[in-house]
Amino acid sequence: MTEVSSLTGRLLVATPALADPNFDRAVVLLLDHDDEGSLGVVLNRPTPVTVGDILAPWAALAGEPGVVFQGGPVSLDAALGVAVIPGDEGPLGWRRVYGAIGLVDLEAPPELLGPALGSLRIFAGYAGWGPGQLEAELGDGAWYVVESEPGDVSSPRPETLWRQVLRRQRGELAMIATYPDDPSLN
């Protein structure tokens, strides 16, 4: 099998042409990408469920808006914690994924990580692709691949993240941010 260039830590931004309702205007942070497949979380799908409702010990550490996010259509009954921790060393219970972004062991005591956390988001479920599946979708033009910024994980206005991420790109991608929600109304 040919080696896949890792996209870990990058963002997948859904193109307006992507027809899957699970990913309409989604911004996905790739947490793992190799020749065995890909795994990420959708950063802009807040739910009405508060972190305190399902993971009370972590509620005080969760960033605004303090709700659980739907990380994707796979394993909605499982929770993933993603946190930004500045600096070179992370605390016990945190595994660096890319740059300052890492995964939190939600079984660890929150007080171990609390002082070090820059931000924390809790995701129910994840987005996953089998070997070659994401590459095929990229080839079909379903996703834009762009650099992530640590603030993307903790955006206080996740409902605007799709437009924000596109707007900061150069050239034609910045123009896509103005694409109407329903082009037929144009």
Image (cartoon, helix red, strand yellow):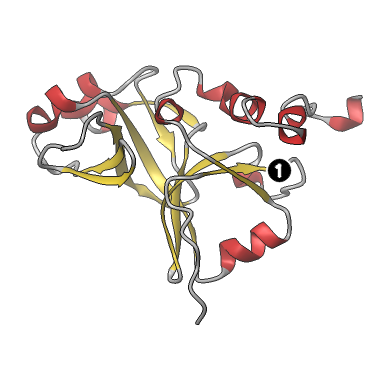
Q: Which residue is mark 1?
A: 15
Residue type at the position of mark 1: Thr
Q: Whole-percent x and y of residue 161?
A: 56, 26
117 sits to left or right of 176: left
Query: Which residue sits at x=8%, y=27%?
Result: 111
Comparing 6 with 123, the one in front is 6
Badge 1 local density, few (<14 within 10 Å), some, or many (20+)? many
Q: Whole-percent x and y of residue 73?
A: 50, 50
Quadrant showing the C terminus: top right
User: Compared to 183, does 16 lie above or below?
Assistant: below
Q: What secondary structure is found at the residue carrying circle 1?
A: loop
123 sits to left or right of 160: left
Query: Which residue sits at x=14%, y=42%?
Result: 93
User: Compared to 79, does 54 lie above or below?
Assistant: above
Comparing 94 with 49, the one in front is 94
Q: Whole-percent x and y of residue 71?
A: 44, 42
Q: Quadrant of residue 166?
A: top right
Q: Total marks drawn?
A: 1
Q: Whole-percent x and y of residue 84?
A: 30, 31
User: Compared to 154, does 105 lie above or below?
Assistant: below
37 sits to left or right of 105: right
Q: Residue reaching furthest bottom? A: 1
Query: Which residue sits at x=86%, y=31%?
Result: 183
Comparing 144 with 54, the one in front is 144
User: Compared to 6, does 71 lie above or below?
Assistant: above
Q: Quadrant of residue 105?
A: top left
